[in-house]
């Protein structure tokens, strides 16, 4: 019996190697070298299921080359594991495209009807991309968004910090839930106006739970339909909201709807596509806020240094007259806090950017990427590359991104938290301003400490979400204490972007 089992296992293995060999018969010697899995044919699928997004770090270490190929049956994924190759993606952007993923998400996440899906196969993603970039580029539209977002962020901070020192909420605040809620409120108020689709708390909760089903929606595996039901709650609010945009909706929102309408997208699909915009706009900022606060508050010396910077350059006023946070000064002069946010993103990013090969393409004149396959650029691999970040690549260095006089910040060209050209995040200025305001207001106005007595910096993370920086699997409760010398009325001075 045992002998029979051994013979059948060996038989399967040999068969696997033969199938693998057959798949590789069509490889071109100029293509990046294949990294063969230990278990033929399905080895990489098993690796991905076991390790999630961290699998790319394991394979990149095993491959040891700047680019290599993973075989998934007859498909190939070219893994680009070095920042050196990033500029070549810009040069070849016409044939190595992000657009097929916009089409995929419109279909899989946004439940696009066949008619709408067809429009996304045409020029619609490019038209939308142009309109997004125009609405989010420095200028009056971005100024409006920043102003609205800042004023709402302040309201959320006031709700938490004003009033009785023994406030129940401040004794055990779930930091992740608070970060999520605050980011949703501030961003929604800016993009959609006061009567935004997330006014009801249950819709905010449904949004975050829906994020756990994105991978299964991509693969069509939400068999129980739980994720679709959560998504439906968000869709319902967007359908109501989009029926008539309020006067305080941003240019970003009205342009998004105008482009979809001109393309011929139906009202229901327009609202659903607006709803999936939230996956980009909330899901990255909230965990980044959470981890940045943790990184600062868990290091008393860094906390003191960040506070000194803020007090010297960006905060003015007094308890009697009220305090003002100058957002322009915060962005331009408080370099440490900007650097800490970037370093948090660098150290904690695990997800990848993807491109599809639209036609055979030579990368850097030497790697052939064949039509129909995919390229993956893993954030954690690029962000830990010693050739770019030096021997301290694996350490959290809060000063890493501070531009030294006459020099450049350490390896800024290898920083891909907001993607890389030409598909960088169009909202990176908005997102950074939001994080800066929320972190600065919290750091100056309050002390935070974990209720358990210990910060969980290495807590297991939730790899089901598709955000660049993942959330922890379990929330952390913190005690929030108002700093008495900074208690009082607060306002923001938001200038031009
Ligand atoms: C810390 C916060 C954020 C991070 C780290 C981030 C990161 C990214 C990245 C990496 C991409 C490119 C995707 C890729 O190459 O695979 C992207 C695209 C995008 N992001 Fe962000 N993002 C953030 C916040 C936001 C916010 C607040 C908004 C909206 C208000 C937004 C809207 C978008 C949109 C619409 C795209 C797709 C652009 C296109 O169609 O070309 N993001 N983001």
Image (cartoon, rainbow, N blue to C red):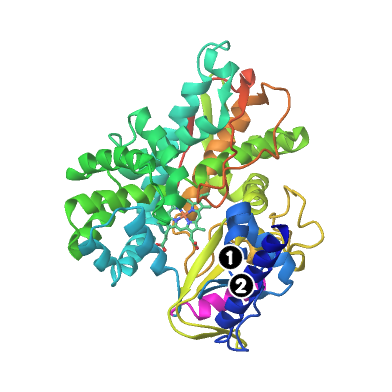
248 left or right, relative to 292: left
Vertical comparison of 197 with 219: above or below: above
Is residue 297 located in the magenta-colored stretch of the structure? no
Assess whether residue 92 is covered by the magenta stretch: yes
Q: Position of residue 159 (x, y in %)?
A: 46, 22
Question: Where residue 220 sits in the image (x, y, percent)?
Answer: 39, 54
Q: Nearer the viewer, residue 486 or 472?
A: 472
Q: Which one is in front, 392 or 325?
A: 392
Ligand 1 within 8 Å of disc 1? The answer is no
**Which residue shows up at 51% across the image and 31% down it?**
177
Point 45% across, 54% down: residue: 427
Would residue 32 appear left or right of 120 to someone viewing this image? right
Query: Do the residues under discs 2 and 1 have CB atoms within 8 angstroms?
Result: yes
Q: Residues within 10 Å of mark 2 (few under 14, many from 20)?
A: some
Residue at 57% in and 32% down: 316
Residue 16's tag is 2
Q: Quadrant of the N terminus?
A: bottom right
Whether residue 362 can be seen here: yes
Tag 1: Cα neighbours inside 10 Å, few (<14), some, or many (≥20)?
Answer: some
Quarter of the image where one finds residue 414: bottom right
Label 1's element? loop
The residue that label 1 is drawn on is 42
Pinpoint residue 268: horizontal percent, then vertical percent. 20, 50
Q: Bounds of the magenta span?
A: 80-94
Label whose residue precedes the other's in the sequence (2 or 1): 2
Q: Nearer the viewer, residue 207 or 395?
A: 207
């Amino acid at each position: 019996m045992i002998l029979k089992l051994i013979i059948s296992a060996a038989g399967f293995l040999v068969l696997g190697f033969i199938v693998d060999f057959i798949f590789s018969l069509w490889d071109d010697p100029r293509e990046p070298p294949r990294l063969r899995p230990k278990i033929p044919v399905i080895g990489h699928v098993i690796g991905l299921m076991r390790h999630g997004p961290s699998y790319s770090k394991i394979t990149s270490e095993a491959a040891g080359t700047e680019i290599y190929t993973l075989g998934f049956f007859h498909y190939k994924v070219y893994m680009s594991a070095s920042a050196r190759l990033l500029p070549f993606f810009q040069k070849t952007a016409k044939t190595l495209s992000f657009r097929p993923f916009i089409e995929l998400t419109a279909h899989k996440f946004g439940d696009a009807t066949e008619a709408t899906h067809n429009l996304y196969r045409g020029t619609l993603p490019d038209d939308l991309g142009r309109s997004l970039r125009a609405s989010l580029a420095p200028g009056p539209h971005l100024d409006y968004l920043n102003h609205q977002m800042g004023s709402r962020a302040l309201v959320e901070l006031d709700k938490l910090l004003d009033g009785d020192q023994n406030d129940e909420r401040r004794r055990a605040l779930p930091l992740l839930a608070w970060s999520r809620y605050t980011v949703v409120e501030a961003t929604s108020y800016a993009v959609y106006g006061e009567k935004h689709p997330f006014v009801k708390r249950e819709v905010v909760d449904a949004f975050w739970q829906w994020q756990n089903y994105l991978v299964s929606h991509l693969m069509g595996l939400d068999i129980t339909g739980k994720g679709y039901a959560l998504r439906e709650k968000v869709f319902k609010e967007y359908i109501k909201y989009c029926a008539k945009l309020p006067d305080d909706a941003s240019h970003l929102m009205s342009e998004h709807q105008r482009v979809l309408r001109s393309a011929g997208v139906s009202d229901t699909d327009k609202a659903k596509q607006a709803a999936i915009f939230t996956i980009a706009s909330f899901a990255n900022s909230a965990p980044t806020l959470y981890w940045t606060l943790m990184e600062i508050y868990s290091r008393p010396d860094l906390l003191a240094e960040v506070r000194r910077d803020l007090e010297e350059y960006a905060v003015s006023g007094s308890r009697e007259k009220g305090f003002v946070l100058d957002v322009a000064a915060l962005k331009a002069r408080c370099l440490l806090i900007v650097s800490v946010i970037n370093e948090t993103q660098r150290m904690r990013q695990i997800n990848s950017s993807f491109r599809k090969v639209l036609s055979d393409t030579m990368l850097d004149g030497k790697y052939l990427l064949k039509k129909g396959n995919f390229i993956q650029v893993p954030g954690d691999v690029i962000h830990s590359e010693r050739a770019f970040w030096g021997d301290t690549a694996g350490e959290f260095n809060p000063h890493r991104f501070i531009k030294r006089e006459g020099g450049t910040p350490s390896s800024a060209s290898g920083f891909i938290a907001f993607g890389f050209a030409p598909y960088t995040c169009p909202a990176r200025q908005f997102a950074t301003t939001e994080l800066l305001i929320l972190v600065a207001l919290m750091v100056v106005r309050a002390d935070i400490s974990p209720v358990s007595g210990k910060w969980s910096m290495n807590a297991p993370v939730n790899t089901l979400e598709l955000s660049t920086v993942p959330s922890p699997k379990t929330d952390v409760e913190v005690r929030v204490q108002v700093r008495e010398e900074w208690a009082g009325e607060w306002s923001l001075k938001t200038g031009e972007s």
